[in-house]
Image: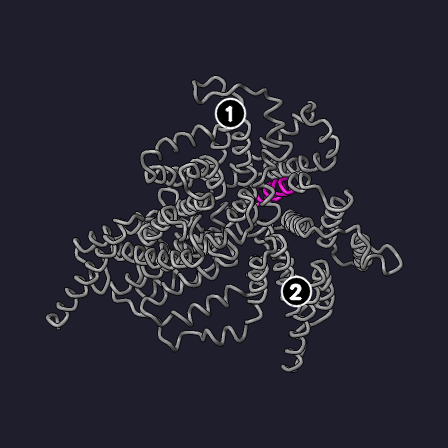
């Protein structure tokens, strides 16, 4: 039982597997089919268009080739069955993938966005039902009923797929069957979210839904004109305002692709590379194990974007290592939780919220990356400083050099693993959409894994090098001609790898990565669908303006009070619901109000995003800390208290960005380019100093142990630097110089006396 508990995912409390027996294999192939469906629809490849523009003389389309491959597969299974081989697993896979082909082929060209969203939520329900049936149902009847619920959720998606055009034509006039299907969709969504993620998000969404139905009975100004049941159900379950709103669209495109991208990179060995680099660079320094945790989590954040996933992956190695070298279990868990949660703000692959933010604000994803990069670096710098000072305070040394890997050697041996990430960064900053960049990154990673098995069959090192260069040139040429050819190259290499030594094992790795991606998308996708009800309520009733007006009225007298109020709302919501719905709800309520108070829109959204992440570190419900708890063998609450102390400097960064948006590289009107560059440099210096002062005051150590009055003076200096004004900045710098000077003088004077 203990071993099984360790394998559970803290985000949804389900094991990292699909279950045993036939039901487990069925669920596995459903998950693979889900990922294949999302890849095809996200890539936007026209499967009914003749290849090479019909130059082959016949209308050979990718869809026809897919059907031909499925037919050959079916024949091969029949031959295998006639020879006495077990073909059950292959038959399940064939049916699942053939069903996906049928879903995609039903529409000419690409599937309509509404259908993609509906089938995305349907697949989520089907996978969720299977996971619950295979892992939580204790009776045969329970397993059957849960599978039926999953099938019913998928049936809701099929309903919108089958009747897409009739539903459009009768928009505003739903039939009784439409209303019944819509009601079932909401009930099943609430059921799966409750069973997988807990009751908090269901309660929040349920309250908003109840407000739509009964809010006219509330006193002013909270009442509305009243909406009939038919209008509410249609608004929430058909169209793009409710369950299938922007959040679900982003989940079905950007988020799913980047989850798969991270799953493939992990299968390719990227975690090992990041750990070796971090160990080689920082393992021997003072407090080396904790610095390894911070740096490796920062690197993991570039591909993962999930704080809990980072805790579970890198924490398995770093937390025991920190404990071994003298760090307290609570502090070790707090370091890993703090560092891992920063992955959601670490470019290029930030958390799912970043993609939703870009879509909501209608800005390029690179603009969100620009706004996040300096705060992300400062966040990790503050965590790095905290572990450095804690190590000095407790006299903790680093690891022996003989036990450390070489960072340079790790890069030389596994440099090719960095190529998909480098391509992703280039495409994002070159102005390509996240969807295209993520598609290419995913295709290149799959190509990398598959080509690796082919390269293993090449004996000579020189020939192997030529092979890799050739693959790189072919991929670059295919990318220049179009992403379709990149996919074609992946298919060709997959066929070749199946015929080489180790190729089938490599294909199994890719297959497992596809299934893992679908499973990992469960909490994110369900949260996005659920929060659509909240957003649908706001668009239908206008309830968001009430809260916004209140925030504006408070901010007219004090902007800091509005910011604190927004932070508290975000932290409170974050105690019970994930980062995505927390961000969407709080930003919908508070961001417009902060804009009215003069805060740039992207800065106000980043402010909410930042504290939505911090909510996963704050007690009593600190998801990242409780994920670290079984690894550290310490109370999640104690880990949370340590994480708060370590992350304390990071709390000041959003406030500083509000008072001077240059910290998020946001140019205010009337400032020249040179002036803006100087302003950014000054803000980086000031923020770094404020973060350093907060960190020293929180740990109580600088060059030596800090006295009480020194810590208070450091806090006063940091507060003065946070509030950007012509008066407070000089005061902050003067107090900082005073505290540093007096502390250095006192510790330096005490050292000879102690000797």
Q: Position of residue 680 (x, y in %)?
A: 40, 57
Q: Nearer the viewer, residue 673 or 448?
A: 673
Q: Earlier in the sequence, mark 1 or mark 2?
A: 1
Q: Which residue is mark 2?
A: 447
Q: Residues within 10 Å of mark 2 (few under 14, many from 20)?
A: many
- Count up the numbered dots: 2
Q: Which residue is mark 1?
A: 210
Furthest residue toward left: 753
Please identify the dominant SS of the magenta region. Answer: helix
Residue 313, above or below 203: below
Q: Nearer the viewer, residue 254 or 456?
A: 254
Residue 488, above or below 416: above
The reply to whether the magenta stretch includes residue 257 is no
For the magenta stretch, what is the residue range? 120-134
CA–CA distance in space, label 1 to label 2: 49 Å
Q: Secondary structure at mark 1?
A: helix
Residue 6 seen by the camera: no
Q: Nearer the viewer, residue 258 or 658?
A: 658
Residue plotted at (16% across, 53% down): 709
């Amino acid at each position: 039982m203990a071993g099984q508990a360790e394998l559970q995912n803290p985000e949804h409390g389900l094991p990292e597997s699909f279950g045993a027996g036939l039901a487990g294999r069925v669920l596995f192939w459903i998950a693979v089919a889900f990922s294949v469906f999302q890849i095809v629809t996200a890539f936007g490849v026209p499967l009914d268009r003749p290849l090479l523009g019909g130059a082959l003389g016949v209308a050979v389309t990718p869809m026809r080739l897919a059907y031909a491959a499925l037919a050959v597969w079916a024949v091969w299974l029949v031959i295998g069955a006639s020879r006495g081989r077990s073909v059950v697993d292959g038959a399940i896979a064939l049916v699942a993938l053939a069903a996906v082909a049928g879903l995609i082929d039903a529409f000419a060209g690409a599937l309509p966005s509404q259908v993609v969203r509906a089938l995305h939520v349907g697949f989520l329900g089907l996978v969720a039902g299977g996971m619950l049936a295979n892992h939580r149902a204790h009776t045969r009847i329970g397993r059957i009923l849960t599978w039926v619920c999953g099938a019913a959720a998928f049936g809701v998606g099929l309903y919108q797929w089958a009747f897409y055009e009739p539903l459009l034509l009768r928009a505003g006039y739903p039939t009784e069957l439409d209303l019944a299907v819509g009601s079932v969709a909401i009930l099943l969504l609430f059921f799966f979210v409750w069973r997988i993620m807990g009751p908090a998000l269901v309660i929040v969404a349920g309250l908003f839904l109840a407000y739509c139905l009964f809010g006219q009975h509330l006193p002013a100004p909270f009442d509305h004109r009243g909406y009939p049941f038919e209008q509410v159900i249609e608004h929430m379950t058909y169209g793009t305002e409710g369950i299938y709103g922007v959040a679900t669209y982003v989940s079905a495109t950007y988020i799913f692709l980047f989850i798969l991208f991270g799953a493939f990179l992990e299968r390719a060995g990227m975690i090992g590379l990041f750990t070796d680099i971090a160990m080689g660079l920082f393992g021997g320094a003072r407090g080396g194990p904790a610095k390894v945790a911070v740096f490796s989590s920062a690197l993991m954040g570039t591909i993962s974007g999930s704080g809990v996933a980072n805790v579970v992956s890198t924490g398995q190695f770093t937390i025991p290592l920190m404990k071994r070298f003298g760090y307290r279990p609570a502090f070790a868990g707090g370091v890993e939780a703090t560092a891992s949660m920063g992955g959601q703000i670490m470019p290029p692959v930030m958390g799912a919220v970043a993609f939703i933010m870009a879509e909501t604000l209608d800005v390029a994803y690179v603009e969100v990356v620009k706004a996040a990069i300096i705060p992300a670096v400062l966040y990790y710098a503050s965590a790095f400083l905290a572990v450095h000072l804690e190590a000095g305070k407790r006299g903790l040394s680093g690891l022996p050099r003989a036990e450390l890997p070489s960072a340079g050697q790790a890069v030389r041996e596994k440099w090719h693993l960095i190529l998909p990430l480098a391509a992703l960064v280039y495409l994002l900053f070159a102005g390509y959409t996240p969807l295209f960049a993520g598609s290419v990154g995913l295709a290149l990673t799959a190509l990398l894994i598959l080509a690796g098995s082919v390269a293993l069959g090449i004996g000579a090192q020189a020939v192997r090098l030529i092979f890799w260069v050739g693959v790189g040139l072919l991929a670059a040429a295919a990318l220049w001609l179009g992403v379709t050819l990149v996919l074609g190259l992946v298919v060709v290499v997959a066929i070749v790898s199946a015929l080489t030594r180790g190729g089938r094992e490599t294909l199994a790795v890719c297959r497992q990565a596809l299934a893992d991606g679908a499973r990992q998308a469960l909490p994110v996708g369900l949260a996005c669908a659920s929060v659509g009800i909240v957003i649908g309520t706001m668009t239908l009733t206008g309830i968001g303006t009430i809260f916004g007006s209140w925030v504006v009225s408070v901010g007219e007298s004090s902007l800091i009070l509005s910011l604190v109020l927004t932070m508290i709302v975000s932290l409170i919501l974050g105690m019970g619901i994930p980062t995505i719905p927390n961000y969407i709800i709080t930003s919908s309520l508070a961001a417009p109000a902060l804009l009215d108070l003069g805060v740039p829109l992207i800065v106000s959204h980043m402010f909410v995003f930042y504290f939505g992440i911090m909510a996963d570190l704050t007690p009593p419900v600190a998801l990242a800390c409780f994920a670290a708890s079984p690894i550290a063998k310490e109370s999640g609450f104690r880990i949370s208290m340590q994480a708060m102390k370590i992350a304390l400097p990071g709390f000041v960064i959003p406030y500083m960005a509000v008072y001077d948006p240059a910290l998020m590289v946001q140019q205010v009107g009337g400032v020249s380019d040179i002036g803006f560059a100087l302003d950014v440099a000054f803000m980086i210096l000031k923020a770094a100093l404020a973060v350093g002062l907060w960190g020293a005051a929180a740990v109580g150590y600088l060059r030596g142990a800090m006295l009480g009055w020194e810590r208070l003076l450091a806090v006063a200096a940091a507060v003065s630097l946070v509030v950007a004004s012509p008066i407070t900045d000089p005061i902050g710098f003067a107090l900082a110089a005073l505290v540093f000077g007096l502390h250095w003088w006192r510790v330096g004077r005490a050292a000879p006396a102690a000797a």
